[in-house]
Image (tube, rainbow, N blue to C red):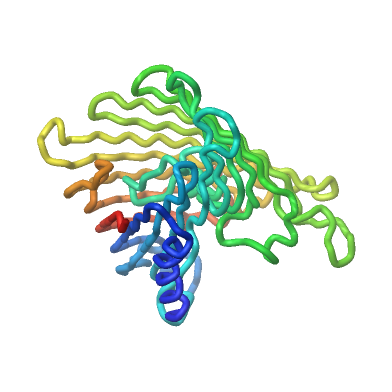
Amino acid sequence: MKKLLLATLVGLFLLPALLGALELKISGEMWNRWTLEQGKVFADTSLTAYKKEITKNFFSLERGYVGMEAKFSQSMKGRFTVDIFSSDILKDGAGLKLKYAYLDFSNLIPIPDLTTTVGLQKVYFGSIYDWSYNLIGKAPTDEYKYANSADYGISLNGYLPGGWGEYQLGMYNGEGYKNYGSNLKDNIDPAFLANLRIVPTAGLTIGGSVMTNGSERKLKLADATENSSYNTQLLADGILRAAFGPLDIWAEYLYKDISYAPNFSAKDYSATCFSVFPTLKLKSLIGADIDLQGRYDRSDETRMPDSKKKNLLNAWTGGLNFNFMADDSGSPALQAQLNYVRKDYDEDASGTDYANGKKDTDTVMLQLKWRFASTIY
């Protein structure tokens, strides 16, 4: 692990120079976090009664992004980012994974304002690529497993004429950035995506995404029998953003429909999620660079055929950000974040796995997030 980490970091900085990059930037982002979580556990050996107990209390490096951006010409540039993070799976207590590794070509297709992106990249579905983690938690599309935050593939990214918005068309593996090669032998169908954002007036954005995906293959390779795990997925998302003065509000609606092979159609189901995320920037009101944030999610998976696992979640988040300094883009180079998250599963609508509030949690997270960026040449 240590040798792999060293080789990765050395290669990160030497490769662009060897390839003759005209410009090289390095950047990093570290998330040092304290997490305290309270949940329900069995009260005694009878395994019938529950009590509230602290189930998590630890410090960690949740993300350690280190990356470089290399400009090879006026029409081609690349990005490579790795994530170093605390892990209880590996004996060294740390993990390493690829996050981004792609090239942007600005004139590969002769369409104005169109960029072709090839490689491991963001998935332009819903709020994932807009999400800047001003709240500590993930974007709803990522949090509730509608789409992966990054994947291997190719995408076309362009702007609408007259400043009316932007669009993306993509084709991906469909399994996320953690799976490739032999891990995909049971999923030969790529995922296809279309995303559109329209800005009818300053401060207002309306958009939506549609994605088709699948899991595994219809017939097993071993014996050509029908695969009970094979399914096709239709994913849809609608977004509304209103940003006026110090107030910025996002609203998002998610829908997914999962269909299995005809002989296993009893497993078909659909799910929905609604999320609203307001932010109030206090700097213009009190002078201090402080943001107040809230979020409410309602994730409905009550249509799942497994009566034990079906659930209806209501999640509330309150957040406070203290922003210190700023980089060249205006983003805070140092940020202290305090979040409280309450997850409450509706007992009447949820299955037995969620009875007696045994999966309800209250979580407090305190995070110090710092960034750096520098142009080497």
Viewer-side residue, 212 vs 45: 212
Residue 113 is at least partly visible in this image:
yes
Of residues 92 and 279, the one nearer the viewer is: 92
Asked whether, in this view, residue 198 is left or right of residue 181, the answer is: left
Query: Residue at position x 33%, y 57% from top?
Result: 27
Number of marks in the rendered image: 0
Q: Residue at x 24, y 41 (%)?
A: 330
Query: Looking at the image, which is closer to me, 359 or 23?
Result: 23
The residue positioned 32% from the left and 34% from the top of the image is: 278
Residue 302 horizontal side relative to residue 78, left or right: right
Pick the front one: 178 or 290: 178
Residue 218 vs 56, above or below: the answer is above
Q: Quadrant of residue 227?
A: bottom right
Q: Quadrant of residue 179?
A: bottom right
What residue sits 21% from the left and 46% below the top? 326
Which residue is outermost to the right? 224
Q: Quadrant of residue 6 in the image?
A: bottom left
> What percent of the width, then of the height, locates residue 152?
59, 53
Quarter placement of the C terminus: bottom left
> Residue 164: x percent and y percent?
45, 21
Question: Measured from the top left, where is residue 329 in percent x and y?
Answer: 28, 42
- Confirm whether residue 346 shows in the render: no
